[in-house]
Image (cartoon, rainbow, N blue to C red):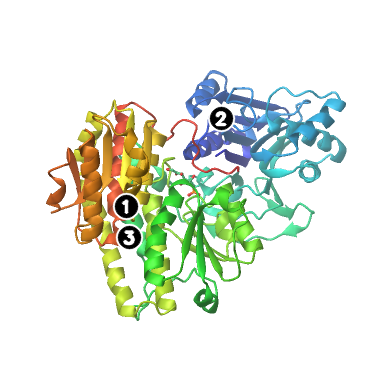
Amino acid sequence: MCGIVGYVGTEKSTRAVDVVIEGLSRLEYRGYDSAGVAVTTGTISQAKRAGKLQNLLDELEAKPLPEATAAIGHTRWSTHGGPTDENAHPHLSFDGSVSIVHNGIIENFAELSRELAEQGIERATQTDTEVVSHHLALALKKEGDLTKAMLATVAQLEGSFTIVAVAADNPDTVVAARRNSPLVVGLGDGENFVGSDVAAFVGQTKRAIEMGHDELVTITANSVEIQTFDGEPVEREEFLVNWNAEAAVKGGFDTFMEKEIHDQPAAVRDTLLGRMSESGSLMLDELRIDEAILRRIDKIIVVACGTAAYAGHVAKYAIEHWCRIPVEVELAHEFRYRDPVVSEKTLVVAITQSGETMDTLMAVRHAREQGAKVLAIVNTHGSTIARESDAVLYTHAGPEVAVASTKAFVAQITATYLLGLYLAQLRGNKYSDEVLTYLDELMAMPDKIADVISREDEVKALAKDMKDVTSVLFLGRHVGFPVALEGALKLKEIAYIHAEGFAAGELKHGPIALVEQDQPVFFIVPTPRRPVLHAKVLSNVQEVKARGARVLCIAEQGDSAVDDFADAVLRIPETPTLLHPLVSVIPLQIFACALASEKGLDVDQPRNLAKSVTVE
Ligand code: F6R
């Protein structure tokens, strides 16, 4: 979602704008539809453009901004008002005294807007942000100081926000405030930064401070002062960012998505790393919930959105089988509004790559209010959901830049397996040697994933051949069902092709009516070592084949039963049933990525989508 950067240095120079632009380019992965930058030098100058960052760069080349000590910048993902030059941030106040950038939604903006109209201040844009800039300017007139003015302004706001501001008459200071929206401070030498995540300044410094909610920071070149919205000073621990700037570049691939598909063996391996104690038992040391509580839980509810929710679906099969605990999987935005039955014996597992998804955050808060313990499976260190949960199990997938999730998905599934095995061991459902056998099988998965990726050319050839299809169906049973859902989602979101995933058993209850001559249908075929499951899917294959479908099977090496019916077979290595999704999803990711590239689409930043969805 929106990306924010703020900078203050010692000397007036072009560095202020350069640092902000570099930060914005690193934040592009969050998804955006316009970008802008402002500097303060006694007056405020700004440039902003709808569309890609390049449009802003072109504008800055034609009309450079003045040298400055302080600058703020923004990549916007529209909420109030369309993606136009005017609606792009920063927003300058009516009197030119302050300029702000904002991430989030101001819920009482209509009321704030009315108050302005009563004072004769008219809005020039459709954004909620502009309204805040005017209120901040009014407060600055009264308070005479940007920090005090910001404190007075945030007291009037309802909703979620990170706001970063500069003032015309204070060219050495940037002030930023956060409520329910991310904000991190970067510490430099004679310069300081703020950003919506560490990517905003990781090219400049690795030293950072995570801000708490309802806190405000005032940065100058040589000082960082944090206080609560009530004006109480706050001391926060500095931490070192463990992502290097190179981790977020394409590594020789044409797109981030391709790179991240190839990162998957490492993502799974790294997520498994360091989880085994010397005695060979599972050790999840980020898990800070009392073991006695975990022994008592009688239900698990997984809350997540999109791809992360499909990882939760896979988790249900594994955890129920290993631990004999009922597992429900619920879209986070549905969970909160349906009055779920939650008690102190419920463990809510929130799965999220960004750790900032507002729907999931709200579900986490709701669960905790109801007395449940929340364990978060998160990829982004220091993110809001990680901080607000009772325990965290980090996936070690590294930064995921492409909007369409790939490596985070396999890392999330891996983390849920670890959780399942941990609980099975703790609750006595599995002996340690059984757990070790599963762990050995898990340790073998990175090589198996690499094996599937090594045959990507076959998948790419298929994608090339199918680039003009208008509808694709995906069918699977058991753990193949969430994989089918994920395969369809990938194709929808990056190739803009109508795609549906179904449980294969559901076929004759309706979806088979869609099958006509040449309709492409992917099947995720289970291992033949589960003969009943395998036979059932083969029956489904025959049902659609009989109606003229183009059948595309993802099947294990050596499974010759599919050969008679399939128009194409994409092979995966022999894998235990419950671990199948880690390999069977790979060809579907490659297929979607290759097909979108064939169509000449922007694979990494599909239309209308944002990487981090920080509004409900
Ligand atoms: C799809 C995708 C989304 C996310 C969803 C949750 O490729 O990336 O469906 O999985 O928006 O995001 P996180 O995991 O950040 O909570």
Q: In this view, does 51 lie above or below 432?
A: above
Residue 321 lies in what quarter of the image?
bottom left
**Residue ID for mark 2:** 35
**Residue ID for mark 1:** 477
Residue 256 lies in what quarter of the image?
top left
The mark closer to the camera, 3 or 1, is 1
Q: Residue at x 30, y 76 (%)?
A: 434
Q: Is residue 26 above or below residue 301?
A: above
The amino acid sitting under disc 3 is Arg
Distance from Cα at disc 3 to Cα at disc 2: 37 Å
The amino acid sitting under disc 1 is Arg
Q: Is residue 370 above or below residue 483?
A: below
Query: Callout 3: 10 Å neighbours few (<14), some, many (20+)?
Result: many
Disc number for residue 270: none
Label 3 close to label 2 by CB (< 8 Å)? no
Distance from Cα at disc 3 to Cα at disc 1: 27 Å
Camera-nearest residue between 335 and 280: 335
Q: In this view, does 583 lie above or below 430?
A: above
